[in-house]
Amino acid sequence: KAGVTQTPRYLIKTRGQQVTLSCSPISGHRSVSWYQQTPGQGLQFLFEYFSETQRNKGNFPGRFSGRQFSNSRSEMNVSTLELGDSALYLCASSETGSNYGYTFGSGTRLTVV
Amino acid sequence: DAKTTQPTSMDCAEGRAANLPCNHSTISGNEYVYWYRQIHSQGPQYIIHGLKNNETNEMASLIITEDRKSSTLILPHATLRDTAVYYCIVRPFTGTASKLTFGTGTRLQVTL
């Protein structure tokens, strides 16, 4: 079974630009969550999607948004990038109704210059 | 979600058992204890979870105290590849997905 796939692996953007990150969950997983990881703040929850609906949202500004498609693939978008948005962005998928944990992708390393 | 407290760092000699403690004194009756680890620059990896009984899988054992206020993750024969940050998380099982709240974790250093 293929794991969670995140693309791209690395990205460099300029302040003020926008960026879109992609996540393909494990086949059959309908829940996709996004996390931001920085050295200073650790792993922070961004949002979670289930069957194309946002179920939970973390404490991030409106510049951070996401969506989920009918095939459960998800994208997150960050507009008007700031230097502080430089981070590892992680996506995790989970099987519906399962007690087992989330499976994380390897992440996208975003650098804003 | 209940809050967890873990030591900041621990060392373990290769081949010995690594015992990682976690305090979750405010855990609710419907909350499970999950353990994840993160090896440098990779996504967190699920290790094990439990409700009130001790659990064992191919990676580790989880010992939960009878009052459920604390737990210990045991890596029976630590190797250098077990060097990572280990996160203890408590969350309810709702039947649908819910967010994971990561604390600062324990940085385990396995040495020769």
Image (spheres, coloured by chain):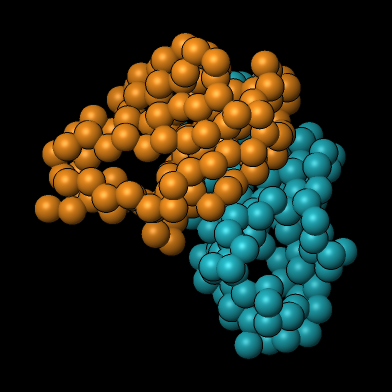
Chain colours: A cyan, B orange
The answer to whether residue B66 is visible is yes
Q: Residue at x 62, y 74 (%)?
A: A86
Residue drawn at the location 17% of the way across and 37% of the way down: B16
Q: In the image, residue B13 lies at what x, y percent?
A: 17, 46
Quadrant where the C terminus of chain A lies?
bottom right
Position of residue B40 measured from the top left corner of the image (x, y, whole percent): 39, 59
B17 vs B29, left or right, is left
Residue A26 lies in quadrant:
top right
Q: How many marks?
A: 0
Q: x, y (%) of residue A2?
A: 47, 40
Taking A21 as reference, is B18 above or below it?
Answer: above
Single out the residue that lies furthest toward the right. Answer: A62
Residue occupying image coordinates x 50% and y 27%: B70
* Residue B42 against residue A31 in the figure, above or below: below
**Is residue A101 among the parts visible in the rendering?**
no
Q: Is residue A20 above or below residue A98?
A: below
Left or right side of A57 for A26: left
Picture residue at 54% right of the left edge, 42% below the top: B5
Q: Quadrant of residue B90?
A: top right
Of residue B54 and residue B71, the one placed in the foreground of this image is B71
Quadrant (top left/top right/bottom left/bottom right) for the N terminus of chain A = top left
